Image (cartoon, rainbow, N blue to C red):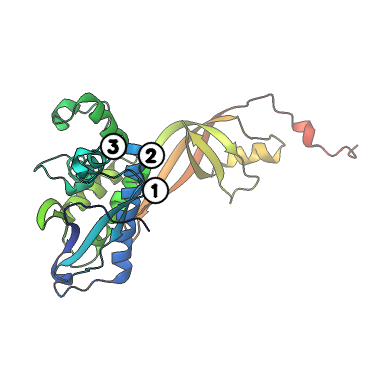
């Protein structure tokens, strides 16, 4: 096991009446800790690739209070110097701590701050990047956007904040030397949930690429929408009549459809989507369909 890095004391705190005695449901806590671990590893990889592999680990001095979780940063990096902050490795570690919410400079931009500002939504071309990332230069902005918009980072962020969904836990804090650096409240997470749900179009017309077709109505088809893959059941009786008459569909075909999306959020905060297609408007086959290909040669 590599030694812990010599960095200032860092910790996360889950705060609220439910944890005033220093106790917390292990299932709730494990969700948050796994999220912190995934977040650290993924951000480290996006920042440094395989050159520097940073991970996070619980400190042995586990405390009570709110629920206070002291942490250490670990790495397999071989090169070390006595004054880490003067080394390239030290600068990398400092940057990683900052983006993860343990920065030494007050007000430094981090993932949690952006999560609150954007209500969990991705950074897009429509955003005023100079305004929202004013303290970063162009290269740093591009890296921050890449990290923040990364799907794994977003999932890990929400996992780290998942204990806020438990009754009686109202705040998540990152601290450096016992000083609060960043705070995310239950209300921030609720706003992010509402923004995520409002962005879902419940009914829309789409042109989808068929990845895999189903032969019976109760099974889902596998589609791709501009590289994003998902499953959907087709409920259009006219389409199934075409299938019954021998028309075949498969990889490479395109289908213009009315797509309907419903959703529900489970107790752990995960948004589950269910997609159905009530109407197929048009089909473009990759090649000319050949119904007779499926005809039994013994038929007279």
In what quadrant of the picture does the N terminus appear?
bottom left
**Residue 119 visible somewhere in the drawing:** no
What residue would you read off at disc 3?
Answer: 122
Residue 153 percent location from the top left of the image: 33, 45
Looking at the image, residue 33 sits to the left or right of residue 224; the answer is: left
Point out the tag, 2 or 3, that comes first from the N-terminus: 2
What residue would you read off at disc 2?
Answer: 51
Q: Disc 1, disc 2: CB below 8 Å?
A: no
Distance (Cα) linking label 2 and label 3: 27 Å
Q: Nearer the viewer, mark 2 or mark 3?
A: 2
Q: In which quarter of the image is residue 61?
A: bottom left
Helix, strand or loop status at disc 3: loop
Which mark is drawn over residue 262?
Answer: 1
Q: Disc 2, disc 3: CB below 8 Å?
A: no
Of residue 278 and residue 209, the one placed in the foreground of this image is 209
Residue 9 percent location from the top left of the image: 17, 56
Helix, strand or loop status at disc 2: loop
User: Is the residue 291 above or below the residue 220 in the image?
Assistant: above
Q: Nearer the viewer, mark 1 or mark 2?
A: 2
Q: Residue at 30% across / 46% down in the picture?
A: 197
Residue 144 percent location from the top left of the image: 26, 35
């Amino acid at each position: 096991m590599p030694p812990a890095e010599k960095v200032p004391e860092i910790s996360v705190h889950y705060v609220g009446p439910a944890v005033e005695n220093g106790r917390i449901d292990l299932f709730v806590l494990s969700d948050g800790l796994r999220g912190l671990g995934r977040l650290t590893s993924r951000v480290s990889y996006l920042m440094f690739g395989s050159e520097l592999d940073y991970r996070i680990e619980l400190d042995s001095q586990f405390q009570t209070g709110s629920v206070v979780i002291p942490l250490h940063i670990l790495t397999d990096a071989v090169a070390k110097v006595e004054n880490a902050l003067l080394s390239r490795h030290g600068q990398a570690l400092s940057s990683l701590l900052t983006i993860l919410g343990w920065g030494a400079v007050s007000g430094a931009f981090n993932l949690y701050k952006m999560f609150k500002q954007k209500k969990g939504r991705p950074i897009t071309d429509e955003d005023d990047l100079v305004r929202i990332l004013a303290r970063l230069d162009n290269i740093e902005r591009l890296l921050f956007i890449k990290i923040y918009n990364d799907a794994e980072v977003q999932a890990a962020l929400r996992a780290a904040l998942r204990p806020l969904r438990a009754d009686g836990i109202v705040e998540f804090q990152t601290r450096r030397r016992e000083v609060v650096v960043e705070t995310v409240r239950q209300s921030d997470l609720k706003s992010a949930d509402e923004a995520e749900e409002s962005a879902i179009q419940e009914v829309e017309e789409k042109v989808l690429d068929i990845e895999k077709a189903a032969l019976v109505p109760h099974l889902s088809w596998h589609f791709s929408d501009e590289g994003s893959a998902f499953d959907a059941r087709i409920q259009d009786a006219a389409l199934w009549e075409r299938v019954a008459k021998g028309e075949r569909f498969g990889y490479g075909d395109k289908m213009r459809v009315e797509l309907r999306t419903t959703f529900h959020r489970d107790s752990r905060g995960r948004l589950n989507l269910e997609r159905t297609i009530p109407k197929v408007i048009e089909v473009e086959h990759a090649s000319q369909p050949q119904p007779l290909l499926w005809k039994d040669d013994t038929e007279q």
